[in-house]
């Protein structure tokens, strides 16, 4: 951080010096000569060589010089008796090593990135004090990247105009791209969509490469950092198309929708990983490999964006537009780096500006994708709602139809059950009629009583079927109605000679099977009371049936004198039938009190 502040202070001092300078406004491009030395000769040898060739253009692009040193002879003329101060600016973005000599062999600058005032500019600049006409010699060593440069001799006014405006423009563009990058970082943390993460990595890789390319790193970092960036040229390019491949696969969904294109992206990812150790070492450095791979990737990625868009993937339209713009810039810079053309000196910041435009368009691509997804979601929701409404209408109609069918079936079932109960009741009445006919023919009193008992039991069964076919509910029997009608039968037939008052407290609805058994039990209890317990007058029978804590409790009590249960004959059918039905059929617990009156308490779990 201290080093950065020191650099900024030097820039400020340089500006003050240039503002206060009284030199004339002139821009002199020295007529330079060039010689490529393959023997690594020293300065004195080079000075005496007559093989220098004049450079006819302001910009020199030698491509990648794998061996030897590049020597540039710069003649500077001073016909006055005064010392002239000039700034020798070397427009080039990446060199490994540069040494400037005067004609006496004195080294003016020993290292391109040395921490002095002249390095507080984007381009390598040397402050010269020209006391007389003499030749300067520039030794350039550059085996890793393109050897391209142009030399300009400037006064302070020219220098400040160009340097300051250039720095401001570049920093502004960097700031703009960084702001977009952080914006997408925030979106990634919010959405967890890896497309944003890979996009941020790609933009960061481009920024690192461009920071090295336009020498912005030299303004704020020490020479060791700058040298590291210059020596990792292939790594920077590989990181760019590796992260771009990951981003493209995620954004364009090539894994699922375009598997063949996805395979090519995987090949580029593998190349990015393989090329660094193969072609980026001090022992074997082949920058052409990274440049050509990068160029192939740019064309392929542009083709993919257009192809995917034409295949109906609308979200790729901004993506394709961004890479269509970049393909010209990348093609130009890579061909220039390979020495095939020489145009980048006229637009050295082309890729940086195109990167800023690309970053903006790709950010718009995310927004566009969100809009498209929202639109598709809206259409899907509308289609879903329409489908649901149609389905709901169809289901409603089906339900209404099925309900009518079920209701019809239920009505038919109810009718059949009523008919069944009615016929059962009629059949039981027929049996009762047969018993009565047989009773009339009987001459034995005991046999006649047996017929009466049998008729009462059958009548108890018949009564349940009669209630069921007369009522709407064919499953549960209203025990209050059922027992009340049984009691009325007894009052009409058996209690002519004996007065008896019934006290009923019944509230229960019980299924048919259990109701029949309870009816027979109650019938037997009343029959036994009539036979053995009732007196001529003031007779009372209490019958209770209620639901208590999950159990049905049937309580029966008459006003008789009771009896000794031990004296009951073994062939007494009434008591035996009550116990059998209660215990075996209803699984009930029965309690009998017969000392003072006859009382039965049945606890029935249904």
Image (cartoon, grey):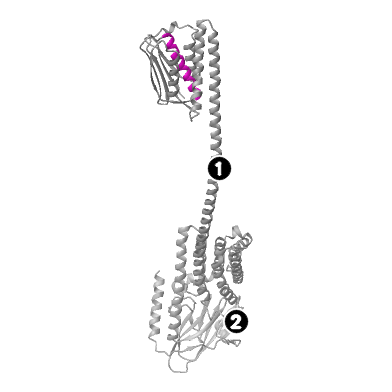
- Secondary structure at badge 1 equals helix
Between 187 and 604, the one nearer to me in the picture: 604
Percent coordinates x, y for residue 296 in the rendering:
61, 69
**Residue highlighted by disc 2:** 36
Residue at the image position 42 percent from the left and 86 percent from the top:
157
Q: Which mark is in front, 1 or 2?
A: 1
Between 308 and 114, the one nearer to me in the picture: 308
Tell me if residue 529 is in the magenta stretch: yes
Task: Please determine whether, in this image, residue 139 is positioned above or below residue 182.
Answer: below
User: Which quadrant, please, contains the N terminus?
Assistant: bottom left
**On residue 63, which mark appears?**
none
The residue range painted magenta reads 512-532
Answer few, some or many: residues within 10 Å of disc 1's Cα (few below 14, many 20 plus, some between 14 and 19).
Answer: few
**Quadrant in the picture for residue 269:** bottom right
Precedes in sequence: disc 1 or disc 2: 2
Percent coordinates x, y for residue 247 in the rendering:
54, 63
**Residue highlighted by disc 1:** 401
Percent coordinates x, y for residue 363 in the rendering:
49, 66
Asked whether the beta carbons under mark 1 and mark 2 sit within 8 Å of each other, the answer is no
Residue 119 in view (yes/no): no
Marks 1 and 2 sit apart, C-alpha to C-alpha, by 97 Å
């Amino acid at each position: 951080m201290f080093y950065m502040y020191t650099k900024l202070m030097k820039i400020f001092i340089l500006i003050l010096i240039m503002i206060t300078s009284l030199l004339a406004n002139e821009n002199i491009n020295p007529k330079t000569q060039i010689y490529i030395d393959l023997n690594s000769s020293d300065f004195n040898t080079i000075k005496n060589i007559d093989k220098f060739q004049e450079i006819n253009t302001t910009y020199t692009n030698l491509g990648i010089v794998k061996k030897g040193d590049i020597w540039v002879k710069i003649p500077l003329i001073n016909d006055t008796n005064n010392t002239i101060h000039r700034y020798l600016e070397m427009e080039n973005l990446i060199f490994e090593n540069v040494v400037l000599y005067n004609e006496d062999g004195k080294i003016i600058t020993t290292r391109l990135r040395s921490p002095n005032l002249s390095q507080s500019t984007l381009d390598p600049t040397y402050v010269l004090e020209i006391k007389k006409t003499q030749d300067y010699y520039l030794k350039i060593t550059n085996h890793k990247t393109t050897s391209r440069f142009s030399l300009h001799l400037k006064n302070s006014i020219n220098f400040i105009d160009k340097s300051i405006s250039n720095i401001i423009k570049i920093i502004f563009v960097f700031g703009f791209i960084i702001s977009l990058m952080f914006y997408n970082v925030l979106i990634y943390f919010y959405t967890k969509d890896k497309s944003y993460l890979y996009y941020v990595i790609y933009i960061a890789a481009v920024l690192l490469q461009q920071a090295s390319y336009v020498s912005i790193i030299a303004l704020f970092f020490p020479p060791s950092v700058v040298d590291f960036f210059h020596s990792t040229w292939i790594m920077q390019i590989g990181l760019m198309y590796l992260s771009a491949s990951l981003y493209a696969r995620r954004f364009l969904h090539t894994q699922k929708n375009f598997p063949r294109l996805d395979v090519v992206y995987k090949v580029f990812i593998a190349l990015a990983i393989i090329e660094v150790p193969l072609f980026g070492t001090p022992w074997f450095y082949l920058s052409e490999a990274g440049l050509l791979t990068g160029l192939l990737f740019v064309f392929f990625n542009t083709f993919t964006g257009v192809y995917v868009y034409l295949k109906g993937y609308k979200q790729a339209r901004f993506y394709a537009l961004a890479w269509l713009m970049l393909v010209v810039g990348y093609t130009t810079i890579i061909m220039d780096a390979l020495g095939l053309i020489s145009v980048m000196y006229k637009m050295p910041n082309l890729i940086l500006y195109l990167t800023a435009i690309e970053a903006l368009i790709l950010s718009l691509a995310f927004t566009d994708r969100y809009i498209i997804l929202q639109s598709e979601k809206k259409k899907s929701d509308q289609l879903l709602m329409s489908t649901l409404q149609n389905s709901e209408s169809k289901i409603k109609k089906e339900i209404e139809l099925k309900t009518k069918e079920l209701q019809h079936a239920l009505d038919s079932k109810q009718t059949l059950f009523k008919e069944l109960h009615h016929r059962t009741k009629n059949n039981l009445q027929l049996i009762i009629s047969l018993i009565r006919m047989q009773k009339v023919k009987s001459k034995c009193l005991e046999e006649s009583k047996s017929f009466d008992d049998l008729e009462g039991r059958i009548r108890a069964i018949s009564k349940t079927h009669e209630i069921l076919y007369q009522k709407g509910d064919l499953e549960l029997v209203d025990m209050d109605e059922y027992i009340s009608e049984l009691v009325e039968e007894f009052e009409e037939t058996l209690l002519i000679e004996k007065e008896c008052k019934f006290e009923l407290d019944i509230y229960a609805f019980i299924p048919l099977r259990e109701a029949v058994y309870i009816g027979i039990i109650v019938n037997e209890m009343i029959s036994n009371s009539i036979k053995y317990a009732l007196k001529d007058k003031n007779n009372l029978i209490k019958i209770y049936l209620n639901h208590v804590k999950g159990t049905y409790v049937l309580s029966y009590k008459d006003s008789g004198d009771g009896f000794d249960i031990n004296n009951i004959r073994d062939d007494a059918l009434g008591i035996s039938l009550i116990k059998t039905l209660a215990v075996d059929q209803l699984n009930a617990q029965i309690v009998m009190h017969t000392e003072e009156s006859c009382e039965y308490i049945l606890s029935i779990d249904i």
